[in-house]
Amino acid sequence: MIFQPPHVIEIATAVRERRTLAREIIDEALSRISRFQEPFHLFTAILPELARQQAKAVDARVLKGDDLPLAGVPFAVKDLIDVAGVPTTCGSQAFANHKAAADATVVKKLVDAGAVLLGKLNMHECAFGFTGENAIYGNCPNPWNTERIAGGSSSGSAVAVSLGICGFTLGSDTGGSIRMPAALCNLVGLKPTYGRVSRAGVIPLSWSMDHIGPLARTAEETAVVLGAMAGADGLDESSSSSGVPDYSAELGQEIRGLKIGVPRNWFFDSLQPQVAQAVTTAIDRMTALGAKRVKATLPHLPEVLGAHRAIILSEAASAFEPYLRDRPEDFSVDIRTLLQGGQFIPAVDYLKAQRVRRIVRRDWAKEFARFDCLATPTSATVATSYGQSKVKLPGGDTPLLNAYLDMTMPFNLSGQPALTVPCGFSDDDLPIGLQLVGAPFREAMLLRVAHQYQQETAWHHRQPPLG
């Protein structure tokens, strides 16, 4: 029998209609964890007792007639998101004894909506890296080729969905840490607008650029999850009071007449040929559906990268300062070096970076007013091998940091919503992602475009070779 991965909407519907029980869904998910945990180092904490308790509660609530949009759907969270009574390690020895007193707001909202928490997921240490390598919990490899990286820092979040354990997962994104692993693992990954989703109960890396968002197989599933977790939160002063729409309401609307911005600068300058071909073909497919291609130019992109670096290093050094001061040896050498370097960013550079951010938001708002969404590659390359530091691109040997994050990190600085959707495979069967970016709080538009594209393509139906 061919394994069918869990689908958020199908599971929730079946549980609500009492065609299956939440506890049966969770038993299957826990069985798959047992199969895949050792080779993939997915979880930092597996919570079977809690999961079965929550599943039992879901079945009881269904009998009472409660409306549960995520009834019985198994999920897990990146291990920088608090779960009451469980250590939040942030993938680091420095936080090994950091036991959470309460659930993060996003966890509480999702459990209230009927989702069932399986555990905490592996990640790049302190969310400060893009490969997903972790010396404490083990590397979390790519299911499409276990000699390749899954991407980071939300590596476990991507792999747990890719392997069919979870219907969806949560990750964090400060420079591309949801979108990049989602793209490398053939998933949809959404970084919402800054402030759209509460970060209360989440260990920060860069408080002005951190975003929490879902990873799933489809835009349709992502819309349901986002609807359950979005909204204002009095525990997070950065959360927005902007109303939460029904993200599923517009999914069925065709994209005929929509304007798709295609950048003339930066994003297509130096790509692996197969990435360029897949993304171009995806945009062509959208125009075949009636969307109109519009030439776009985003100014200030070189300055954006410098500003992003100054802000993330400064804010990370501040966020982790007590741990770095008292127990520097608990951080790996790479992370400790980054954090210590951040302590020496001059205040004037940080302030200049914030000025760049204001200018970027002003000027990009004018450009985004010309189209409905921007379409770019999610990364310049497919998944690379462990230990690889550069990749050969048409523009020359390129550091992996730039090959992976130059496409994604600009929108952490601007705070705009951005998602990746599967759009093809390389000749060696490695996934390729298309990034869609919108104006602030236009997640519904991005999900609509991604859903209509997925209705016309089958990339998201492909599953990794599990032997």
Image: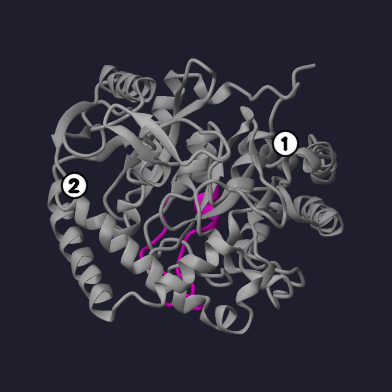
Nearest-to-viewer mark from 1 and 2: 2
Where the N terminus falls, by quadrant? top right
Would residue 130 appear left or right of 71 to someone viewing this image? left
| Stretch of the chain drawn in magenta | 225-246
Say which residue appears at 45% left-offset and 69% top-offset. 232
- The tag on residue 368 is 2
Does label 1 or label 2 sit earlier along the sequence? 1
* Residue 415 visible, this orientation: yes
| Foreground of the two, 404 or 108 | 404
Quarter of the image with the C terminus in it: top right
Residue 240, compared with residue 433, is above or below; it is: below
Depth order, front residue of 106/326? 326
Crowd band around label 1 with a 10 angstrom C-alpha radius: few (<14), some (14–19), many (20+):
some
Residue drawn at (71%, 25%) of the image: 4
Q: Which mark identifies residue 370?
A: none
Q: What kind of element bears circle 2?
A: helix
Front in this rendered view, residue 445 or 183: 183
